[in-house]
Amino acid sequence: MKKMTIRWLCMGALGLVVLAAMAEEKAPAFVERSRAELLDRVHGGWAGMLIGGIEGLPHEWKYKDQPRATLPEFTFLEKGARSDDDNDFEWTHLYFMDKENAVKLPYQRLVEIWKANMNSGIWVANKKARELMDQGVVPPETGSVARNPHAWYNLSGQFCVEAYGLIAPGMPQTAADIGLHYARIAVSEEPLQAAQYWTALISLRAFHEGAIEAAMQQALGAVDPQSCMAEVVADACRAFHAQPGDWKAARRVMDDKWRIQRKWNSNSTPVNGALVCLALLYGGDDFYRTLQLAMALGHDADCNAATAGAVVGVRLGFRRIAALPQFKMPDRYVNKTRPQLPAECKESEQAETLLRVAERVILANGGTQLAVAGQPGYRIKLQAPQVLERLPAKPHGPDNKP
């Protein structure tokens, strides 16, 4: 019966992918946006990721068996943003991507960058990958299950990739391709499904004006239908509709299945991806409430709030986030972890860096520069999500660890 249930869930997810693909066929092939409009969206996603990750830190690992009793209040980084592993892996890569005019930095170059910069504030799969580099191992072997004991489950497949969706707006295939390139440094198998999903969703959300659930369903086209990620999204949507006013009840359903019954640990992509999905569904594009939920739902709450913040932030744009009454963040980012990067810069300068990289991605994938309403802008060739990395025939899991 359990196998039959899983089969039907996968078939349901596949059906949603087919419907999304049919809708995509009728969608326009291109979208035109001014540079200012696109910067606002990219900036919103980046700021959302920073706010969620850093404001979520007080809630990290605080709520395991039960969620937080009430939704937490918080201000939006009133002392400014700072380096943290929820943002500085991507920021380091983006800094060198921009500086060296390379979207996918060669793995040997990434080893040099990691050896110079990734020596503090790194954990679990990323820490093991860094140790392997000292032994002469080069990605993607640093993220293989044969060498890295955390590679088959670790959350770096989610929280180290969101920005790659921001630099490929409206291009989920390209976003997933870039995300996979960098995710393979530390993980493989199921976490790569998460990397494909979250980069694709963020990419789609840059221009997707419909409800968040519709975008989540469309992003399923980027993952293997047999994956836990596909099943997690289907489960979250089902729990949300079964308990539309009770996020705690939905959380119990998801945690009971994925952590208790299926035995994925609290640092895994299925357990935490489930909670991000719930935060997005119950948050309904309300930025503040979505982050409150991501923090209160528990487990790796700072990482989950960062991912949720990126998804909602790119949809709303920075101007709308900055207009919220809780917003306090000065235009400042302090780096205390990555020696080759500036010790301090403006957060808005980081957004400009992302947009410069995004421009290269747009032009390399069939887009052009043009005037939009008399302002500099872009004509972006839209893509449908597509599975680039499938699960192996016998993926590792809680009952089949490497």
Image: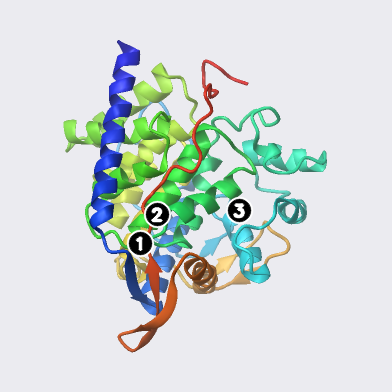
Location of residue 64 by image quarter: top left
x 53%, y 21%: residue: 394
Name the image quarter holding the C terminus. top right
Q: Which residue is mark 1?
A: 206
Q: Which residue is mark 3?
A: 89
Q: Where's residue 222, x and y in %? A: 41, 44
Circle 2 — which element? helix
Of marks 3 and 2, the one in the foreground: 2
| Rendered image coloring scheme | rainbow
Q: Where's residue 117, x and y in %? A: 72, 55
Q: Where's residue 53, x and y in %? A: 47, 51
Label 3 amino acid? Phe
Circle 3 — which element? helix
Residue 309 is labelled as none
Mark 1 and mark 3 residues within 8 Å of each other at the beta carbon:
no
Q: Which residue is mark 2?
A: 202
Location of residue 226 by image quarter: top left
Label 1 amino acid? Ala
x 29%, y 26%: residue: 9
Q: Is residue 324 visible?
A: yes
